[in-house]
C-alpha cells in the first residue's frame, strides 16, 4: 500500500481511544469497537475490531472481502470456526488468552464465546475492515431466487428467514424465542474434540487445484 499521508500536517493523528468508536452494541457485555483509517488517519495497511462477548454469543457467520483476519484472544475463550473453501471442511479452533487463529481473506467464518468476559482482537491487513454478513445475505437475497435455486418452498423460506435482522453482527437476538437450554457451546466442543483427534491422526486430504474464478 502506498501512503499519501502528509506527516508534517497538524491534522496527522498518532493516537486514538478505541473505546469511543462503537461499531455495534447488543448489550453491555456484547459489543464491537472499530479502529481503521477513518479513526486514525496515519494507519496504513492495518485495522482492528475490539470484540467483547459473553457465553454462547456469536459473531455471526461472515467473510471479509478485502483482508485476512488474525484473531487474538485477550481474556476468556472463543471458538473460531472457519470454512476452508478448498477442502470444504469446517475447521474449529478453541483459543484462550495469548493464542491466535488466522483466517485467510475471503473465507467464511464465525466466532463463539465459550465463557463470560471473553475479549478478542480481530486484526486486519487493510486500512478499513470490510465485511459481508450472513444476516444480510439471508435478508436481501430475493426469496424467489433462493427458492428457485435450491428447490425450496418460497413461503416456508420467507417464514424461516423472517426473524433475521439485517447486520446482526452478534447473535442470538435478545428477544430470541428459541429454547434457552440449547447452547452452541456443547455442540462445538464436541466438534473441537473431533478436530483434535484429526490433528493427532492426520490423513492427507485431496485438495483441488486453485482457481481464480469460482462457480
Image: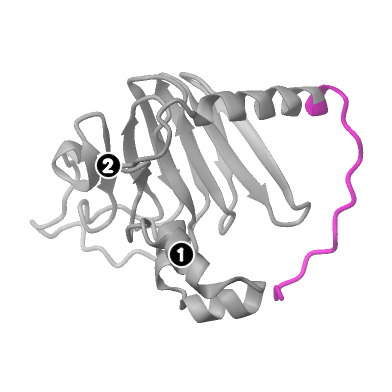
- Predominant SS of the magenta segment: loop
- Using the image as rendered, state which of residue 102 and residue 62 is in the foreground: 62
Location of residue 203 with respect to 83 vertically, above or below: above
Q: Which residue is mark 2?
A: 175
Q: Residues within 10 Å of mark 1 (few under 14, many from 20)?
A: some
- Separation of marks 2 and 1 at Cα, in angstroms: 19 Å
Residue 125: % across, % down: 46, 52
Location of residue 17 with respect to 129 vertically, above or below: above
Q: Residues within 10 Å of mark 2 (few under 14, many from 20)?
A: few
**Taking 100 as reference, is 52 left or right?**
left
Residue 183: % across, % down: 49, 28
Location of residue 90 with respect to 137 vertically, above or below: above
Residue 84: % across, % down: 69, 50
x 51%, y 44%: residue? 110
Q: How many marks?
A: 2
x 27%, y 56%: residue? 37
- Using the image as rendered, state which of residue 132 and residue 210 is in the foreground: 132
Q: Which residue is mark 1?
A: 138
- Magenta span of residues: 198-215
Q: Is residue 132 visible?
A: no
**Taking 118 as reference, is 27 left or right?**
left
Amino acid at each position: 500500500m502506498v501512503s499519501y499521508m502528509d506527516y508534517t500536517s497538524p491534522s496527522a493523528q498518532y493516537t486514538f481511544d478505541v473505546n469511543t468508536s462503537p461499531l455495534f452494541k447488543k448489550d453491555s457485555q456484547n459489543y464491537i469497537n472499530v479502529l481503521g483509517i477513518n479513526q486514525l488517519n496515519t494507519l496504513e495497511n492495518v485495522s482492528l475490531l475490539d470484540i467483547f462477548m459473553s457465553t454462547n454469543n456469536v459473531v455471526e457467520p461472515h467473510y471479509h472481502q478485502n483482508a485476512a483476519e488474525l484473531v487474538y484472544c485477550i481474556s476468556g475463550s472463543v471458538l473460531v470456526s472457519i470454512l476452508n473453501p478448498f477442502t470444504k471442511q469446517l475447521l474449529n479452533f478453541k483459543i484462550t488468552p495469548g493464542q491466535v487463529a488466522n483466517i485467510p481473506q475471503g473465507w467464511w467464518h464465525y466466532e463463539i464465546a465459550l465463557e463470560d468476559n471473553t475479549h478478542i482482537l480481530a486484526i486486519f491487513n487493510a486500512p478499513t475492515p470490510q465485511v459481508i454478513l450472513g444476516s444480510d445475505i439471508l435478508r436481501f437475497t430475493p426469496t424467489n431466487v433462493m427458492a428457485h435455486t435450491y428447490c425450496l418452498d418460497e413461503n416456508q423460506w420467507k417464514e424461516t428467514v423472517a426473524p433475521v435482522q439485517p447486520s446482526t453482527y452478534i447473535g442470538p437476538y435478545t428477544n430470541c424465542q428459541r429454547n434457552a437450554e440449547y447452547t452452541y457451546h456443547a455442540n462445538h466442543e464436541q466438534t473441537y474434540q473431533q478436530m483434535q483427534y484429526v490433528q493427532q491422526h492426520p490423513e492427507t486430504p485431496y485438495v483441488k487445484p486453485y482457481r481464480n474464478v469460482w462457480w
